[in-house]
Amino acid sequence: MTMFSKVASRFFPASSAAARRLVSSEAFKTTKTPFLLNWYANPYHTPIFVAKEKGWFKEEGIDLAVLETTDPSDVTEILGDGAVGLGLKATIHILAAKDKGIDLMSFGTLLDEPPTGLIHKKSSNINTFSDIVGKKVGYIGHFGKVMVEDMAKQAGIPLGSFETVRVGMNVTAAILRGEVDTGVGFTNFQRIELEELAGEEVGMLRIDELNDLGCCCFCSVQYVANAKYFHENPEVIAGFMRAVRRGTDYTIEHPDKAWGFMTKANPRLDNKLYRRIFDRTMPYFSRDLRNVDRDWEKVGQFCKHLDVLEMLAEL
């Protein structure tokens, strides 16, 4: 008998209804389907929460448990080792996972090509990329640092003439604290956030334009699965996509009502700043949720150019 059983037996006699309802922790197995977000719950996750609040996942037999992370870099390993089967990651990070031998499968798109670049306050006097000389440039992770340094090389800017600083997803706070002068962020998120909190005009140097990429597909946010989970649970994947498609359609067609569901599920988002981020994100919700071969090809070639992947796995 475990210590818990001994203690329980003192307060709940075996013949009582309470005792019959006790279930040992060893016997408990959740029937929920965990889903790991790529960051804390925020406006661009609205279609997922709409589908959950409207009961569309449950109609598909999926009791979705949405999990948040404070460190987006953790998501790759958590999904990769199968601790959680489903989640969200950016296109470029899925390629990076493949290169590390972490088998993730992308099966749909949430956010389609949100413009990404170096955001900066107007007062920082950054108007062109060459203005980073003498400045501190924030980046999210390894790829961000490599991209910034590659753009500097292309522009003929010595790498020692500016400083790169890893700030993760917290570029807005880093700029406000004066830790960096500019940093990598989304036009529909960190740019709006910085403008609201700094109280001044905010500019952005788009990475796709500086690199002549023709798209911001490297930062598209994808629905992903652990490969083993994906192959063993086709009915869950299909049901998930049907539900989230309904959530996306509803968000696009009824944005005010959708935002109401999102703030009901996440009351801390119910303010002017996050509503502005939601409104700015609307154009980037994927209309058909499909993966685009052209985008994967462009991102793959971009990674080869940056020399950050040893091989390009078939996705």
Image (spheres, grey):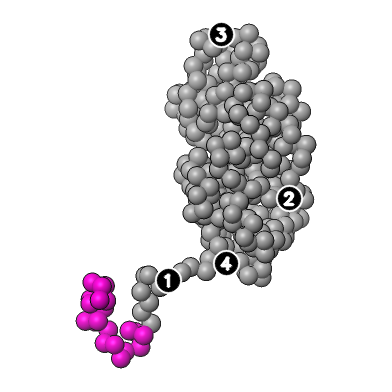
**Image spot of residue 156 (x, y percent):** 63, 8
Residue at point 70%, 61% (across, down): 238
**Residue 6 lies within the magenta run:** yes
Residue farthest to the bottom?
15
Q: Quadrant of the C terminus?
A: top right
| Amino acid type, callout 3 | Pro
Element type where label 4 sits in the image: loop
In this figure, which residue is indicated by the disc labeled 3? Answer: 158
| Amino acid type, callout 2 | Leu
Figure quadrant of residue 157: top right
**Image spot of residue 134 (x, y percent):** 51, 11
The mark that comes first in sequence, 1 or 2, is 1
Mark in front: 3 vs 1: 1
In this figure, which residue is indicated by the disc labeled 1? Answer: 28
* Neighbour tally class for label 3: few under 14, some 14-19, many 20 plus, Cα within 10 Å: few
**Residue 191 lies within the magenta run:** no
